[in-house]
Image (spheres, rainbow, N blue to C red):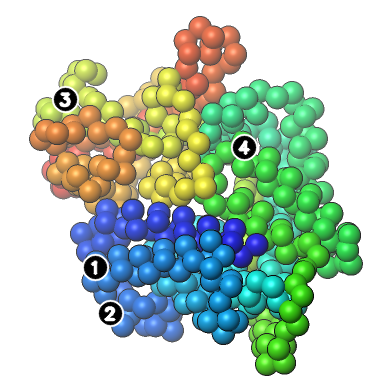
Amino acid sequence: MQQGLGAIFLLAFAAALHQFGPLLSSTGLLPIPSYLKGRRFRQAPSLFHWRYSDRFYRQVCILGLGLAGLAATGILQKAPVLIGVTGWLLMTFLYLSLVNVGQRWFAFGWESMLVEAGFFAAFLGPQGMKPGWAAVFALRWMLFRTEVGAGLIKLRHDKCWRDLTCLYYHYETQPVPNALSWYFHRLPRWFHRAGVVGSHLVQVVVPFALFLPQPLAGWAAWAIIAHQGWLIVSGNYAWLNWLTVVLAFSGFASSGAVPRPLWFELVQLGLLLFTLKLSQEPLLNLTRKTQLMNYSFNPWRLVNAYGAFGSVSRERYEVVLQGSREIFPTRPEDWQEYEFWAKPGHPARRPPQIAPYHLRLDWVIWFVPLGLTLNLALRDRPERRLAWRYESWFIAFLDGLLRNDLQLTRLLRHNPFAGEKGPVTLRALIFHYRYTTPEERRETGHWWVRTQVGVYLPDYHGSLGRRG
């Protein structure tokens, strides 16, 4: 289990290092130095309150990569118990330091999940020793909250989970589909309804068996792993599903020949009391109609509330960015389109398999159209403007594209202005996307059919006051 968790930490630190420059550096879209102003350590514990520079951030990531590599290869688990615990806690705090200054780019449930899992895994103990009983309980409790939290928030927030129709839409409208998502969407409707029933059983009923004796706890773990495997092959959810699979291994019978030393037993007792104290709010949250989703009740991100997909979109909308060399473009051919790595763009491009890697820009920009009021009946008016205010990171992103910033454009799959002067004008359009039918797919080879339904941001020249 610890090696699997170490592998996820390795991936997380690598993604943080690779995407840091354009997103969070001193010249990034949401600079960390600006965020740290006016915030104290107790509000967002992080090493960067003590010292910040872009170089130091990268050093933190590299140190985290080193520790994660030791954990993933099992070396850290072979160290003496005190060294192993210290190494795990240090690695976890390093990642917490990134999460707590990551702002929008780290505002995903699986970021806090990784921090919490790393903290409790530290107290499992080294390889060969009987795993810490309180750590095993805490990890099962975390898995329980992850599954039951997701199941309850679905039943409470969207009637399609209650009438068993959510999977009619989910594979098409999920944040980042993969190539298999098209095929899952085309499965019979009775199969989709059965899938919702199975999801409810695995997420709302099965997790209670995690606290029962073996083999019941193990059977529950296998059911959760099977469900997560289905999600892994049908979409891209960063390391969320993989981390849940790793947590599920806490449901199996523990092994280890070396007995735990007395001082470690006392640590386990303290860990249990600590966990129970922090569990009050998350437990109450599961009983509330206004259940919180992916919420941390403390700045250390321990014993959090989890849950996802309380609501399922019935239609898919995407922001499409285009640039032009003309200051006042008038013809369709004046515009050239940018492509993201994972989110849908050109209808002919095959949706890629990205997970367990986490493309933060692709995920965050997926949320942009969700807050817009869109009426499909007005598709004959694609020129209508759909937004009047914009988040600061989005405007900074457009300014970077106008500069043809190499660091920023590396986060894109295709930059139509690569190797030359950047565009003079940008615009952001809103398109409705739907999967092609099997007949359309055979005829065109396309995965999507898209239709422009509005303008998110009209002609932009680098300043909101100088729009065309």
The part of the image, by quadrant, that contains residue 264 is: bottom right
Marks 1 and 4, Cα distance to the nearest angstrom? 37 Å
Please tell me whether residue 431 is drawn above or below residue 134 in the rendered image: above
User: Which amino acid type corresponds to the residue marked 1 in the rendered image?
Assistant: Arg
Residue 233: image tag = 4
Mark 1 nearby-residue class (10 Å; few <14, some 14–19, many ≥20): few
SS state under label 1 = helix
User: Which amino acid type corresponds to the residue marked 2 in the rendered image?
Assistant: Arg
- Decide which of 25, 223 is in the foreground and name it: 223
Quarter of the image with the C terminus in it:
top left
Mark 4 nearby-residue class (10 Å; few <14, some 14–19, many ≥20): some
Q: Which residue is mark 3?
A: 329
Marks 4 and 3, Cα distance to the nearest angstrom? 42 Å
Marks 1 and 2, Cα distance to the nearest angstrom? 11 Å
SS state under label 3 = loop
Viewer can see residue 21: yes
First in residue order: circle 1 vs circle 4: 1
The part of the image, by quadrant, that contains residue 141 is: bottom right
Between disc 3 and disc 1, the foreground one is: 1
The part of the image, by quadrant, that contains residue 393 is: bottom left
Marks 2 and 4, Cα distance to the nearest angstrom? 42 Å
SS state under label 4 = helix
Q: Which residue is mark 1?
A: 55
First in residue order: circle 3 vs circle 1: 1
- Decide which of 354, 291 is in the foreground and name it: 354
Marks 3 and 1, Cα distance to the nearest angstrom? 41 Å
| Callout 1 touching callout 4 (CB < 8 Å) | no
Name the residue rendered at 21%, 18% in the picture.
Answer: 333
